Image: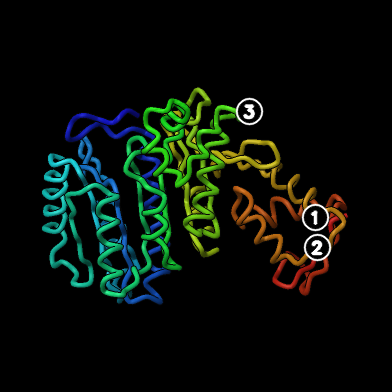
Amino acid sequence: MAAPKTTVWPLDPHTKAKHDLLKHYLGGWFPVLSSYNGRIVFLDGFAGPGRYDSGEPGSPLIALETLLTHSYFSKMECEFLFFFCEAKRDRFDSLTEQIAGFKEAHQPWPENVKIQLIHSEFSETATSLIEYLRGQKKRLAPTFAFVDPFGFSGLPMRVLADLLSFTSCELFVNYMVDYVNRFATAGNVDHHLDELFGTSEYKNAGAAQSRQQFLHDLYERQLSEVCKFRYVQSFAMINKTGHIAYYLFHGTREVKGVELMKDAMWKVDPGGGFRFSDRLAGQDVLFTEEAVNTEPLRQALLARYKGRRVPIAEIEQYTLVHTPYRKTHLRKPVLTPLEKEGLIQVERPGRSGFPAGTLVTFL
């Protein structure tokens, strides 16, 4: 989607899918992080006008609504701090009005929910926050940064690394691979691409067999090496022609974050001709619970563990971290048929299933 020139614009199907995904994820993230932290932060780097052309809520209102209507909210005793950053004046004014209306509709407003509206570029806001915290000798609280720009400018890798250096911080970013692919070797916007990747290696895309895959892998590597995210997942948003519109990257340092994002991905039905996808064992895996094809997972497990005897916990961890699948896709859909077919032998502490302590031998 090209950057809109108006204050508000129609809600596209792929944007709605991102918002549905954000809502599902925050529904799990808020209670988990609030249970052992005094403060948590939600940072929306490109917040927009607050609502779309037909009145649909934007990401700031979705984040607030998800928290305030959560069934567990009354038990969340920590402070919630929301930063909404929007650089364009007309959209910032619209956002300010929408937030005011939202707060008015949710009186009495909870004292532990604080909102800061920032009329500034994301990179400037993040840099100022980092400098302030360093001056105060403080660390940022656990933060979920939702970064959904048009294009690729104003998103420096070094700023993300500094801002999200705290252990429990996470990143959910829209990586506009079409734009990046188009300009990677053009030479006229290298300063923006240098910032985006934190390296000039993107210039080597022209020699790669697949430019798009090269640029995807480079961004993934930089999130891992520069931002120090232990777990980096990417999900392709594919349109009805089969073309990848963009990638959604999620960076976290906790396995629980991987699990929450994976659960959210499988709950969202993008609709509108769009679909989420990832690859495993040379096959596309579509995120739809209506007809889950677990054959790629089956083949990946047989290849990885052939001739090995491994605990169920290791298989579960591999499935969660290194494949597109959820834990629920492992036991009954894959391991049970493999056992019936004689392709695995199972040593279990109980009579049935694959409980903790189970050992699986792949023949």
Q: On screen, 215 above or below 311?
A: above
Residue pictured at 48% horizontal, 36% vertical: 237
Identified by mark 1, the residue type is Tyr
Quadrant of the rendered structure where residue 166 is? bottom left
What secondary structure is found at the residue carrying circle 2? strand
Q: Earlier in the sequence, mark 3 or mark 2?
A: 3
Q: Is residue 285 left or right of residue 200?
A: right
- Per the image, the residue denoted by label 2 is 360
Question: How far is disc 3 from disc 1 in space, using C-alphas?
Answer: 30 Å
- Per the image, the residue denoted by label 3 is 209
Residue 269: horizontal and vertical position, in percent?
46, 40
- Per the image, the residue denoted by label 1 is 305
Identified by mark 3, the residue type is Gln
What secondary structure is found at the residue carrying circle 1? helix
Question: How far is disc 1 from disc 2 in space, using C-alphas?
Answer: 9 Å
Residue pictured at 47% horizontal, 51% vertical: 250
Quadrant of the rendered structure where residue 77 is? bottom left
Residue 186: horizontal and vertical position, in percent?
43, 25
Pick the quarter of the image with the C terminus: bottom right
